[in-house]
Amino acid sequence: MLWQDSPIFDQASMPAAGDTRRYSGPVIRYASSSGRWVLLATVLGSGIAMIDATVVNVALPTVGRDLALGFAGLQWTVNAYTLTLSAVLLLGGSLGDRLGRRRLFVTGVVWFAAASLLAGLAPTGTLLVAARALQGVGGALLTPGSLAIIEASFVPEDRAAAVGAWSGLGGVATAAGPLVGGYLVQAVSWRLAFLINLPVAALVTWVAVRHVPESRNPNAARYVDAPGALLAAAGLALLVYALTEGPGSAWPPADLASLAAGVALLAAFVAVELRSPGPMLPMAIFRSRQFSFANLVTFVVYGALGGALFLLPLQLQRVAGFRPLAAGAALLPITIVLLLLSARAGRLAQRIGPRLPMALGPVLVGAGLALMVRIGPGSGYLRDVLPAVLVMALGMALTVAPLTATVMAAAGDEHVGVASAVNNDVARTAGLMAVALLPVVAGIAQADYAHPPAFSAGFHRAVLVAAGLCVAGGLLAAAGIRNPRRQVAETPTCCPVSAPALAAERRG
């Protein structure tokens, strides 16, 4: 990092607002007005990406009705964003270190706003999916930069407080997303859920350009792993396309070819990363057994959550008859429980080690998902939805902080940025694959979306499959995670209602 081995400056040394010179070290104090400006820019910038991810799920039934999208179209509305975000995220972090963190952050915010405008005005489902893919690129550029700016800007003794404020306010943004989205969809239009990003992005851009200092890593590799990013994006796109379209059309030759090509391109991606002078995904980090098992647990558990939480708003609105606002509020208890209990779970893992919490937590998440079989026609929130949500939230609170700390500790301080970015991408890729695969495994046909009883039966099978995956994740943690002799002194916490929030607490 640029601030390492650099002199520390106090607030009086802060250059004039708008100065675009590269600073030689962190210059901002947490309690200063400049510190508040930096927090405002980074929280709002990362917040629009977090909120957008949750807003879209709530809006899916209305979007499908207005644009005549079938179930596959709704899957692509979610996956187009996750696909490009997953493929470019690691590259975005390295570009920020090389080109300037503020520059790439602002570029990502402007890109995201432009794509949001296209999404809000999209007259067809095809154009909406294309706009969502562009949004993912913008999100991949701005997301790594938000926390990197904080770490590079604040003096070391104030950095923990700044990260804590950023993560807490980010949790509020995550919680507000479904509520805001549900209200906008119900009271105005689903289009406003995208268009509301524009004034927020304009404010973030103004604040960042005027008040956020530029920083970069002078030791960052000059090589940009564009081949790796292209192979990852193309391989994931072909694989997800085949898994989304193939089952509904009896696997014609074109879909089988897409499946084979996707697997081949992803294999080529691994080969390129092993030989690259500056790999987007450094494979050597997986030599750590602890790191590999932690990411495997992440993939299984967050895949189960991603698939189930894609289907839940559809079940609540299409089958149970919830209005968009009520469906958006359904998962609010998860964020509240995480905010209340994640830090305590982290401290517990410090005392007894991460193995037991990481083994029991996913099992509790699975129990909560299994309880969702009670959700159907005529279901009530307090009777049928809330118990499942609370059990799932308790499992998440027990899992997330130990999982985060284990990933960081296994990588070591010198690789903490890479480790957090890799784990972030693992979580997002898991959700991407689950949205495509879980409906297939559960036997939800494309035509079932138009027939609530058939869709409801498929939803019940899907949450049981997701519950089984979570139990498998707990077993993997019990078998593969080891309690280190000495626990890390600081345990990050996060609020993983979606994959972006999981990674938000990690550096990178």
Image (spheres, helix red, strand yellow):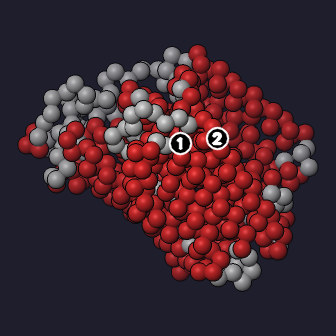
- What residue is drawn where x is 91% and y is 44%? 252
- What residue is drawn where x is 44% and y is 53%? 345
Q: Secondary structure at mark 1?
A: helix
Frontmost residue, 8 versus 193: 8
Frontmost residue, 137 versus 437: 437
Q: Position of residue 434 (x, y in %)?
A: 69, 50
- What residue is drawn where x is 15% and y is 33%? 8
Marks 2 and 1, the one that precedes in the sequence: 1
- What residue is drawn where x is 49% and y is 43%? 354
Residue 89 versus residue 5 in the image, above or below = below
Which residue is label 2 attached to? 476
Frontmost residue, 121 versus 332: 332
Residue 339 versus residue 275 in the image, above or below = below
Q: Position of residue 363 (x, y in %)?
A: 63, 54
Q: Secondary structure at mark 2?
A: helix
Question: Which residue type does callout 2 highlight?
Answer: Leu
Q: Position of residue 109 (x, y in %)?
A: 42, 50
